[in-house]
Amino acid sequence: MTDVLSAPLVVEFPFTRSLGPVQSAFLTGLRERTVLGVRTDDGTVLVPPVEYDPVTASELRELVEVATTGTVTTWAWNPSPRRYQPLETPFAWVLVRLDGAATALLHALDAPGPDAVHTGMRVRIRWAATRTGAITDIACFEPYDGEPGTEEPAAHDGEFTDPVTGIVAPARLDYVHSPGRAQSAYLKALAGHRTVGERCPACRKVYVPPRGACPTCGIATAEQVEVGPRGTVTTFCIVNIKAKNLDIEVPYVYAHIALDGADLALHGRIAGIPYDQVRMGLRVEPVWAEGAAHPDHYRPTGEPDADYDTYKELV
């Protein structure tokens, strides 16, 4: 298996979402060092707050302010913090039921070691020095010697100056990807400006990129078949939102392309033609950038469009 490739891979995207009135008040409150919960119809106080009762599904709007102290209900020690986690030194992940709340909030507890953490311990919020209206405005929890409060949560109108109305939550996954024998051969061929697939010994279909087995017959594939380089656009979409990590001006077209000799369409960007002239059946060929390990885009060949019957099974 020495021919199998392996490389680090990062999947990352920022998730942008708007906030309703309850979540807006909760996050804006954190910015102002205030923790808000929401009261359900039966009087239960939920922290973090939700907009609909998890039992009755009724809309919830009655906000209340709870304490910044609470009790650990369960925990797990994290000996090796990862990038972007709340603390750089070992810490405990804890569920904390804040005084006045009936549910627990997940966050980090700054403690010297696992022996210093136990279910039922009292903790309090340590606020971040700079707060922007996010859960990270709570830097972490820290041990606290005080007793639980007995006061009922006070009603709160949820009104703040300059409320937070939207958030951007980054999502990132770092891992090492090993594509396997079939796709390793496919990637190595691409480095030589060739496209290879594998043929199923039973149904004789050629799959590109190869998967190492036929998804229809469930039989291992090994026979390599070179396909293309030309192909046919089977379907496409027009992209109107610019990606931060791609230096491509919008609008542009991303398409499924059935390479000649392949029984599975792959995807690629279409260029060299106005976006509103791309069509199903358009004949295209790959364009390679200097030193690139895969085609930069596909452009029209100038051939007549392919007849629909020649690619209808690949749409």
Image (spheres, helix red, strand yellow):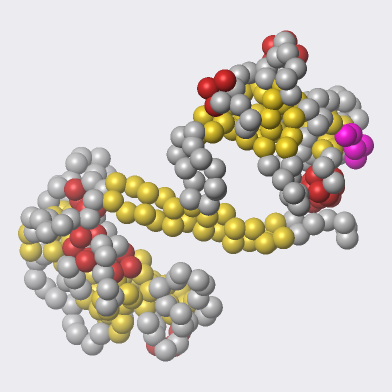
Residue 129 as seen in the image, left or right of residue 13: left
Residue 30 as seen in the image, left or right of residue 264: left
| Image quadrant where residue 296 sits | top right
> Residue 145's x, y, as percent?
23, 87
Task: Please determine whether, in this image, residue 274 is positioned above or below residue 281.
Answer: below
Tell me which segment is drawn in magenta: 222-226
| Magenta span contains residue 160 | no
Task: Please determine whether, in this image, residue 309 is positioned above or below residue 92.
Answer: above
| Magenta span contains residue 225 | yes
Q: Is residue 127 visible?
A: yes
| Image quadrant where residue 153 sits | bottom left
Q: Which secondary structure type mostly characterizes the magenta part of the structure?
A: strand
The image quadrant where one finds the C terminus is top right
- Closest to the observer, 118 or 160: 160
> Residue 285's x, y, as percent?
75, 30
- Closest to the observer, 122 or 233: 233
Residue at screen point 81% across, 48% down:
191
Q: Is residue 102 visible?
A: no
Residue at screen point 56% across, 58% down:
173
> Residue 231's x, y, as percent?
75, 26
Task: Please determine whether, in this image, residue 39 is positioned above or below residue 29.
Answer: above
Residue 111 as seen in the image, left or right of residue 152: right
Task: Please determine whether, in this image, residue 190 is positioned above or below residue 116.
Answer: above
